Amino acid sequence: MSVPRVPFEKYHGTGNDFLVVRADADVPDRAAFAAAHCDRETGVRAGERSEGRRGADGVLFLSLDAEATPPRVPMTLVQPDGSIAEMCGNGARCAALWATRDCGARRVVLDTPAGDRRATVTDPGAGAADPATVEVEMGRPSFDPERVPLSEAVGEPLVEENVEGLTVTAVNTGVPHAVAFVDDVNAVDLDAVAPPVRHADVFPEGANVTLASVADDGDDGDDERTDAAGASGADAADADAADGADDAPVAFRQRTYERGVEGETRACGTGAVAVVAVARRLGLTDGASLRVSPPGGDLRVTVPAGGPATLTGPATREFAGELEADPR
Ligand SMILES: N[C@H](CCC[C@H](N)C(=O)O)C(=O)O
């Protein structure tokens, strides 16, 4: 008897990469599916002889209601540890591109556990393998202790408090982030400092741990950015192509250790929004629209005083294939 398989497509947004599987695919255990196929040592790769990166940061289970106006895309991100993330900024760009290429509409509504998020493919890219540019409405960042959430003992926003040795500000941008501004994000051993913060009692549902540093004036963000998380040359080239139109200087550098991945990712979209939201709260900037540079490429973040944040950046389809439906 042959082993049941399901079709998938691989996408990434600034190096944060995802397997896209249709929600109606017969996957009996989504957590086991994500754990097996996202594994960086043994997980999916482009082909038998591919030298590319294996695995992924999660599986996006997507469906598409093309009859709705605008089309609706229910989106569920299952992470390598089996947990479901309420929101994912880079995944949202990939999901919108997937839907646009399926139904032709450039504007879609992503239906996520964090709420509806409007997304627009502002530049579809020249060909299927080219990065598209996608803008996603990210909702209003919240410092409210119940929204982050913080433990019940904490009655007020957590702003520049010491948590397990890191001075953090807690914000929810669809998912919880503990944001720490440091002199140089690349000088911190993130894998060592992040886990105690990610698991701290003050965060009953855990937190993503995001480091940020103010970029030097006039720095174009291209130096060393592939080093921190070891991005491949291809990813860096994508990022350059996608941010070529945006010549504003980089405002902040970012690195994020993600809950659910339990490690650093090359980029985190909710984290980029969190960096700008916290920078504004701390008075580090009054700029409403800023360029944020994680290791995998650059993102444009807007955090207006009274409205939803937006996240703009590249999304790229890498390859497609079939995966074992039940790898347990
Ligand atoms: N990488 C995602 C965030 C996933 C969030 C997840 N790691 C969690 O909160 O459990 C992003 O681009 O926003």
Image: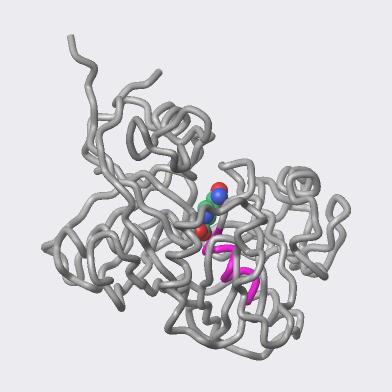
> Measuring 29% from the left and 76% from the top, which residue is drawn there?
123
Judging depth in this view, the residue of 206 and 144 nearest the camera is 206
Q: Position of residue 27 (x, y in %)?
A: 29, 29
Q: Position of residue 195 (x, y in %)?
A: 74, 43
Q: Position of residue 17 (x, y in %)?
A: 44, 50
179 relative position to 300: left or right:
right
Q: Quadrant of the N terminus?
A: top left
Its colouring scheme is one colour
State whether residue 31 is above or below residue 137: above
Instruction: Indicate whether residue 273 is drawn in magenta.
Output: yes
State whether residue 219 is above or below residue 225: below
Q: Position of residue 117 (x, y in %)?
A: 38, 67
Judging depth in this view, the residue of 2 and 241 nearest the camera is 241
State whether residue 273 is above or below residue 228: below
Q: Quadrant of the C terminus?
A: top left
Judging depth in this view, the residue of 275 and 263 nearest the camera is 263
> Measuring 38% from the left and 37% from the top, which residue is drawn there?
50
Residue at the top extreme of this rendering: 1
> Measuring 57% from the left and 79% from the top, which residue is drawn there?
291
How many numbered circles does the render carry?
0
Residue at the bottom extreme of this rendering: 286
3 relative position to 307: left or right:
left
Residue at the left extreme of this rendering: 67
Which residues, given as a range, are shown in magenta?
A: 267-276
Instruction: Indicate whether residue 24 is drawn in magenta.
Output: no
State whether residue 119 is above or below residue 76: below
Magenta region, mostly helix, strand or loop?
helix
